[in-house]
Every structure is written in structure tokens, then in C-alpha cells.
Amino acid sequence: MKNFLQPPRLRIGEDSEEHRHATWLELFYDLVFVVAVSQLAHNLEEDVSLSGYLGFVFLFIPVWWSWIGTTMYANRFDSDDIGRRLLVALQMLTAAALAVNIHHGLDENAPGFALSYALGRAVLIVEYIRAGIHIPSARPLTTRYATGFAIAAVFWLISAFVSAPWRFVLWSVGIIIDLVTPFTATKFQLNLLPHASHLPERFGLFTIIVLGEAIIAVVDGVSEQKWDVFSVIAAVFGLVIAFSLWWVYFDNLGGTPIQKARAEGKVSTVATWLYTHLPLVIGIAGAGVGVEEVLLSEQTVALSDAGRWLLCGSIALCYLALGILHRLGVIRYCKIRSKYRVGTTVAVIAIAIFGKDLLPVAVIGFVAVTCVIQVVQDLYQSRPTTRLVDPEI
């Protein structure tokens, strides 16, 4: 901490954008979301069904948006002083409360979940108001954000005192307002685009958090099963899937969306990058639970429909999101890679449709092969000779 008290400062702009890494405080803050993602996965493990998956997604969105809110604020206005540290500590408390209330978050713990989310947004609103006071050039943006997030927070606060199903109607309205608020401030964002090196790193760190759940799923699944050849092979396939997803995501990650938005004068590129990460991380988290479901299944009996669709549907969602990111040039622009990602989406869905009689190890094996093909294709396309002759890279 360089100063005891200092106002928020503008951390972005072409003239001030030195290479920037996540701070120790940001990394410490992320630890709460490791727990939250773990709790979300635990909820899905208890109810592997369509309704269970929809509930998982419904709770995942506000958790993810809580992390996004703090991350986007820090990207633009971070300062290392006692006031900022105390505000982050409050945000960690609200995020921890959110994680505590995820279990039965759609039942008896729903009021606690709603209150935790609303309080977290209140802290973020205070931060934006504080930034607007000290940075006049950012005031139109911070005012718009503070107003939109405050309206959404009111809906969440009221929902804590209303019974279902109206509680969830208020949640839906609140989260829609939250998600739409940045679009109401697009004309103010162009001169305040996120930091080109810091934000991709932060998104990458959250992706690591959900990939970590896939690793935990393999460990938990193996530890709770009697070891046999099929179980060990299935566990290896689970690690292969996680490693392949890591490979194709991080090999294509960079600051291109922000640089492209700055060059073209379009904020939509950054918005596409941000919002397409939601299905990506949901898919990765769901895939982790799907892998554990495979490992906990009887290896000599066909995998259940629910388990097969959870694993295949989640992986398909990941590659569909990656295909969109490639095609729009939000991550490495490449039509060929986009086609391969979408092709894998179709292939994995086909496994879910036609793999009804397959053993668990066969299902996860076929999925792992489709993931490895993506890595091989990227390696092949990255050869120096390919880069020189292929106009679509």
C-alpha cells in the first residue's frame, strides 16, 4: 500500500496503459469465488436433471456478475489505499455470504442469497459514486452504472421479503437490469475502454477457477470409487478434457477485443467478449460435474441419460462459445478455428443423442477425443507454413 488514503484513479487510456497484472488483493478476492463455484457445482451434483441444471444456471449468473462488477471497476479505477481495501473486504464478505446461501439457494436460503447479492451491489455502487466524484471525465459512465445497478439492487432487496414465485420474477428483472445497464452507457465507454492486458488476465483467472472444478471433480470421483481399469481410464479422459479446454482457450487469449474496439470505435466487441464468457464458464463448470457423474457411475452399465447429456451438453456449450469468440475476432480471429469449434459442438451433441447404450468410459472417451482433435488442429494450423499461406488465420 503506497498511500494511507487516496482517491480512485483512472487506470486506462492509451497513454497510461503499461503492462498490468492482477494485484494480490484481486487474487485474494478471487478465493471467495473458488468457494462459490464449488458450491454451485455441489448443487448440480445433488440434482443432475434439466430442472437442476436450470437452477444451477439461475444461481450462477448473479455469482458471475458479482465477480464481473468488481473486476470491471478495478480494471478502470483501482487504487491501493485503505479505503479501497476496506471496500473490497466488504465485497468479500457479501460474496462469502452469497456462497453460503447457494446451497438451497432456490428454497429456504433464497432470502439470504438475495440480500447478499443486493449488499454486494450496494458496495459496488458506493465505489462508482466515489470514482465519479474524483474523476470528472468518468462521471457520466459512473453515474449511469451506479443508477442502473441501484435499480437492480432494489429489486433484489425487495425479493428477499417476497415468497416464490414472485421472488424469482424480481430476481429475473433485477439481473436483466444489471446485464443491460452497460449497454445504456455505450457512448461513454468508448473513451474508457478496459485495460488491454489486465482484463484478459482477469477473465483467464476466472476461467482457471472453473477449470479447477473439473480437476476437483476427477479427484473426488476417483477417491469415492473402487479403483478398476475403467475408472482409471475414465479419470485420465476427464483430465484430458480439462487440459484440452485450457489449451484451446489460453492459446487464443489476448487483448485483441479491446484493441479492436479502440481501432474500430466500437464498444460491441468488448461486450461480445464479456457476455460470451458466461456460457463458456457455465459450460466448463457443468462439464466438471459431468465428469464426476461419469466417474461415480457403475462402469459396467450404460451411463444415465442425465449424466450423458450433462457432460456432452456442457462441453458443447463451451465449444459453441469459443466458436463465436473466434468468428467475431473477439479472441484470435480465425474462421477455420471457429468452424472446428462449432463442428465439435455438433459432434458432442451427436454423442449425447446416439450414445444411449454406451458405457461411461466410452462416453467420456469419445468426448475426450473430440477435445484432443481441437488441440491437434490448432497445433497443425499454427505451423509457420500454414500462417503464411492461409488467408483465414
Image (tube, helix red, strand yellow):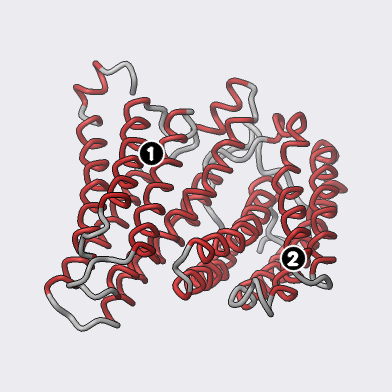
In space, the residues marked 2 and 1 are separated at their CA atoms by 42 Å
In the picture, measured across the screen, residue 387 lies left or right of residue 63, that is: left
Return the residue found at the far right: 133
Q: What element carries label 2?
A: loop
At 33% from the left and 77% from the top, the residue drawn is 220
> Dividing the picture into quarters, in which one does residue 23 lie?
bottom right
Return the residue found at the far left: 229
Q: Is residue 208 above or below residue 40?
A: above
Residue 86 on image: x %, y %: 74, 69
> Dividing the picture into quarters, in which one does residue 303 lie?
bottom left
Residue 33 on image: x %, y %: 56, 66
In the picture, measured across the screen, residue 47 lies left or right of residue 266, that is: left
Residue labelled with disc 1: 252
148 or 345, nearer to the observer: 345
Q: Is residue 364 above or below residue 9?
A: below
Residue labelled with disc 2: 165
Q: How crowded is mark 2: few (under 14 residues within 10 Å), some or many (20 or more)?
A: few
Residue 273 on image: x %, y %: 54, 38
207 or 172, nearer to the observer: 172
The mark lying in front, picked from 2 and 1, is: 2
Q: Which quadrant is home to the N terminus?
A: bottom right
> Dividing the picture into quarters, in which one does residue 258 lie?
top right
